[in-house]
Amino acid sequence: MSKILVIDDDPMVRKAIERILDRKGYDVVMADDGRRGLKLFESEQPDLVITDIIMPEREGIETIRAIHKIRPGAKIIAISGGGRVGNVDFLTLAAKLGAREIIAKPFDPLELTRSVSRCLGGAT
């Protein structure tokens, strides 16, 4: 069973993602910010990380960079409802920094599960 770490400051989003992934048989661990997410990343050794971009404590771009310093080949899906600030598109930036998939909020459960499947090589 693949382990997925979900990092998002919105408890409703975390719970929704957990339900979606749990139904597909994934082992899900969750953190409410990037600081706690990094600790869980190191202790839990997940197969995939799903991280929000706009969060308190340690935002998603910084979290993606830190994860890749720990494990350069880490599989990451970046999610965000924040869009743009000025001329910075956060999801595009996340992809440039190594997120394998990017998903805008709100997202469809099927879109999420397909992205997870692609990142994990078709595993369910």
Image (cartoon, rainbow, N blue to C red):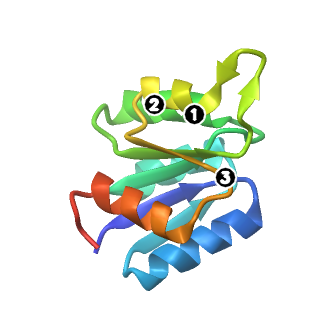
Counting residues from the start of the chain, the first of labels 2 and 3 encountered is 2
**Amino acid at the residue labelled 3:** Lys
What residue is drawn where x is 48% and y is 61%? 111
Tell me whether the residue at label 1 lies in contact with that at label 2, contact meaning CB atoms closer than 8 angstroms. Answer: yes
C-alpha separation, residue under disc 1 versus residue under disc 2: 6 Å
| Residue 53 percent coordinates (x, y) | 64, 39
**Amino acid at the residue labelled 2:** Ala
Residue wearing tag 1: 91
| Residue 5 percent coordinates (x, y) | 48, 58
Q: Nearer the viewer, residue 64 or 112?
A: 112
- Category of crowding for the residue at label 3, using alpha-carbon neighbours closer than 10 angstroms: few (below 14), some (14–19), many (at least 20): few
Q: Which quadrant is the C terminus positioned in? A: bottom left
Tell me whether the residue at label 2 lies in contact with that at label 3, contact meaning CB atoms closer than 8 angstroms. Answer: no
Residue wearing tag 2: 95
Local SS, label 2: helix
Residue 45 appears in the figure: no
| Residue 90 percent coordinates (x, y) | 63, 29
Residue 83 occupies which quadrant of the picture?
Answer: top right
| Residue 80 percent coordinates (x, y) | 65, 44
